[in-house]
Image (tube, helix red, strand yellow):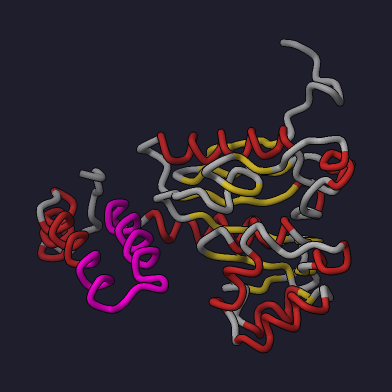
Amino acid sequence: MTPTTPDTAPVVRTERIGRTLLITLDRPAARNAVNAAVADRLAAAIDELEGDGDLRSGVLTGARGTFSAGMDLKAALAGESPEIPGRGFGGLTEAASTKPLIAAVEGWAMGGGFELALACDLIVAAEDAHFGLPEVTRGLIAAGGGAVRLPKRIPYHLAMELLLTGEPVTGARAGALGIANRVVPAGRATPVALELAERLAANAPLALAAVKKVVRAADGTPEPAAFAAQRAEMTALAASADVREGMTAFAERRAPVWQGK
């Protein structure tokens, strides 16, 4: 096996835990900041999740107690781009994934790090974690999804406070605002996120994908168009083997065995 050196060490690691893909940003010396290499490897990790029928969901976290400090400013000044065309910042913020993704946030989730968490479907936060969008303090805006997504997740005035002041909030405060689904003691974000992922894995994979698709289709569209998109998904689900399995399992009082078909 080739020895791992700082130059060849993986910047994003993946590990299969049951039916979940644990994705870890691993540049601890840079507080897991996102450069071109991280964006490329994170996009590859999402492809791994999407392409494996045995995987039901993913958990995104950061190594050594920090989620991500966001964009690697030194790399950006050197001309590197932390974005991938069609996929956005970190290869994730504009990606059209079909499987649930859970952010497990310890330590700092700043700028693009916060935006990576917002790109996930669920967020588990350590109570002493910190979320912030400090781009305005550097002459920028939160263009990796922060300015677009945050006002849809929490009340307008609260979102604007975070976006306009650039000041961070703790994980406990993020939970109170509704940014985080679960707030847990320090060091417990990833274990709890994995437990939550396993709960999702008990449900029909086609239905999970349909939920994500309908929610995206309904975002900012008139209700008639949203209901039309929903009807299309329901029609497809009604013809699936998994729907018949779900009904049969209920009648037989047993756990369903999903095939994703």
Tell whether 225 sits left or right of 212.
Answer: left
Which residue sits at x=13%, y=59%?
235
Tell whether 245 sits left or right of 206.
Answer: left
User: How many marks can you see?
Assistant: 0
Query: Is 126 one of the magenta-colored residues?
Result: no
> From where the camera sits, is residue 49 visible?
yes
Q: Nearer the viewer, residue 177 or 187?
A: 177
Q: Position of residue 26 (x, y in %)?
A: 76, 40
Outermost front residue: 139
Task: Answer with the quarter of the image where residue 189 lies.
Answer: bottom right
Q: Position of residue 209 (x, y in %)?
A: 34, 55
Q: Position of residue 144 (x, y in %)?
A: 65, 57
> From where the camera sits, is residue 104 visible?
no
Tell whether 96 sits left or right of 77.
Answer: left
Query: Is 208 one of the magenta-colored residues?
Result: yes
Residue 176's place in the image compared with 193, above or below, is below
Magenta span covers which residues? 204-230
Q: Position of residue 104 (x, y in %)?
A: 65, 58
Q: Quadrant location of the N terminus?
A: top right
Secondary structure that dominates the magenta span: helix
Q: Quadrant location of the C terminus?
A: top left
